[in-house]
């Protein structure tokens, strides 16, 4: 067995392999998946000398612990956390050399939700439809990490960055999501639409990689009945029967039958990946481009 591998000592609540995902397969019913906080995933790849799109690990809330079988350069970014190597404090947001057999422990997120771990050479699990990403909705790609799993690594292709600490945005104290109203805003009363873009919501603890669920005022429909299932896009704000908006994220379904009141700008979704439960959310209407 190759020595270019990581042994998973502690998988954490939810740690998955992610890259740029599988865009372009919605007509087959396949979600795009991929890293939710794309800038953080890109950063750990740059810090470790990987090409754009190399597969990284995405942890959720409580981190993970790994033991490399050979000397590796790693980088940890995204949600700030405590990083140790064999119990000794190590760098967050900078390249870090981890000796073979040492225990790399990625602690729980101090703020935010998702921490990213890049390793020189990238995580080299098998590609499915061109991507190594775990898709929680369809089940495509590698399963979420489990204790004792072994992840193969690719061969290093570049030189790691030489920085002390790379600047990163802090997880949002308030999540501001710019939205374009439609295509089904006419399914809601005028009062509901005004409420949607003027009243505060909060991130629900039921949020996941499929969608960011919100808590707040329910949106009243102007129409009764059912909407035929139609295509869904990344950032679609779907309103289920309880009236609370749900923002579709990377593992979202490709079709749905609840009305979409608006669509969030794609660049605002990166911050949504780091919005912890209870974070205030504001939807701000912008004009169509």
Image: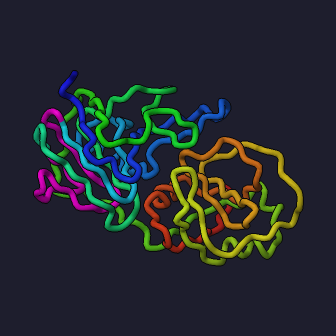
Quadrant in the picture for residue 206: bottom right
Residue furthest to the right: 224
Q: Is residue 80 magenta?
A: yes
Q: Is residue 138 left or right of residue 150?
A: right
Across and down, in percent, residue 78 comes to 34, 56
Residue in the image at 17% along x and 55% along y: 84
Across and down, in percent, residue 81 comes to 27, 61
Query: Can you say which quadrant of the picture contains the N terminus?
Result: top left
Instruction: Name above or below for residue 256 compared with residue 218.
Output: above
Instruction: Please report the bounds of the magenta region as a residue range.
Output: 69-96
Residue in the image at 18% along x and 41% along y: 73
Quadrant in the picture for residue 61: bottom left
The colour scheme used to paint the residues is rainbow
Query: Can you say which quadrant of the picture contains the C terminus?
Result: bottom right
Q: Is residue 266 left or right of residue 169?
A: right
Q: Is residue 136 magenta?
A: no
Question: 97 and 213: which one is in front?
Answer: 213
Instruction: Name above or below for residue 164 compared with residue 128.
Output: below
Residue furthest to the front: 148
Across and down, in percent, residue 46 comes to 28, 43
Across and down, in percent, residue 89 comes to 13, 59
Q: Is residue 107 left or right of residue 30?
A: left
């Amino acid at each position: 067995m190759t020595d270019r591998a990581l042994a998973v000592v502690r998988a954490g609540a939810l740690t998955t392999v992610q890259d740029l995902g599988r865009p372009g397969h919605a007509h087959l019913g396949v979600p795009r998946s991929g890293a939710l906080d794309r800038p953080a995933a890109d950063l750990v790849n740059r810090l470790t000398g990987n090409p754009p799109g190399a597969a990284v690990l995405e942890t959720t809330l409580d981190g993970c612990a790994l033991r490399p079988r050979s000397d590796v350069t790693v980088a940890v970014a995204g949600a700030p956390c405590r990083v140790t190597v064999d119990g000794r404090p190590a760098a967050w947001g900078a390249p870090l050399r981890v000796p073979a057999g040492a225990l790399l422990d990625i602690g729980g997120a101090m703020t935010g939700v998702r921490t990213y771990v890049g390793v020189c050479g990238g995580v080299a699990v098998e590609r499915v439809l061109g991507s190594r990403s775990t898709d929680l909705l369809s089940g495509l790609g590698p399963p979420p990490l489990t204790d004792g799993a072994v992840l193969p690594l690719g061969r290093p292709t570049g030189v790691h960055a030489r920085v002390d600490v790379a600047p990163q945005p802090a997880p949002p104290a308030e999540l501001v999501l710019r939205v374009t109203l439609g295509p089904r805003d006419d399914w809601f009363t005028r009062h509901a639409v005004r409420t949607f873009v003027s009243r505060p919501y909060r991130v629900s603890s039921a949020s996941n990689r499929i969608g960011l669920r919100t808590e707040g005022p329910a949106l009243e429909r102007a129409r009764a009945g059912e909407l035929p299932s139609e295509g869904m896009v990344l950032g679609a704000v779907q309103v289920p029967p309880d009236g609370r908006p749900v923002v579709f994220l990377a593992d979202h379904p490709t079709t749905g039958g609840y009305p979409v009141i608006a669509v969030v700008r794609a660049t605002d979704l990166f911050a949504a990946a780091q919005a912890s439960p209870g974070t205030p959310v504001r939807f701000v209407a912008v004009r169509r481009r």
